Image (cartoon, rainbow, N blue to C red):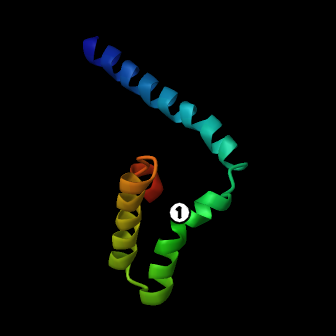
């Protein structure tokens, strides 16, 4: 009986988790980059265009994040994403 109850709780959590993503997926259809998003990605774009190296793209992304953190508003993790 206890195992069945735990299994029901587990499946309830899984269903709730999946259903909680549905509104985000629906809203993501209306999410488009704007001017500052292109600026955040410019260094990584140039790194990819010039080298086609995933390592260089990651290096450029973290360098950009470090620059934002040190000189601007402390934005570091979300710029990499």
Q: Can residue 81 be seen?
A: no
Q: How many marks?
A: 1
Residue 71 in the figure: left or right of residue 25: left
Relative side of 2 to 75, left or right:
left
Q: Residue at x 38, y 83 (%)?
A: 53
Residue sitting at the far left? 2
Residue furthest to the bottom in view is 50
Q: What element does badge 1 sit on?
A: helix
Up/down of 68 relative to 60, above or below = above
Residue underneath mark 1: 40
Is residue 63 shown above or below 8? below
In this rendered view, identify the residue nearer to me: 69 or 15: 69
- In the picture shown, does residue 63 fall above or below 33? below
Residue 47 at x, y percent in the picture: 44, 80
Rendered location of residue 10, percent (x, y): 37, 25
At a point 52% along the width and 35% down the height, the residue shown is 18
x, y percentage for residue 73?
45, 47
Which quadrant of the rendered structure holds the N terminus?
Answer: top left
Viewer-closest of 80 and 69: 69
**Residue at horizontal 59 percent and vertical 59 percent from the top:** 37
Mark 1 packing: few (<14 Cα in 10 Å), some, or many (20+)?
some
Query: Residue pushed farthest top?
Result: 1
Instruction: Inspect this view and state whether residue 44 appears.
Output: yes
Q: Nearer the viewer, residue 12 or 78?
A: 78
Q: Position of residue 50 (x, y in %)?
A: 46, 88
């Amino acid at each position: 009986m206890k195992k069945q109850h735990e299994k029901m709780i587990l499946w309830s959590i899984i269903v709730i988790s999946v259903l909680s993503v549905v509104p985000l997926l629906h809203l993501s259809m209306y999410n488009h980059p704007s001017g500052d998003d292109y600026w955040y990605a410019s260094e990584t774009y140039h790194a990819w265009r010039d080298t086609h190296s995933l390592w260089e793209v990651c290096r450029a992304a973290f360098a950009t994040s470090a620059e934002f953190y040190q000189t601007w508003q402390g934005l570091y993790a979300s710029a990499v994403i």
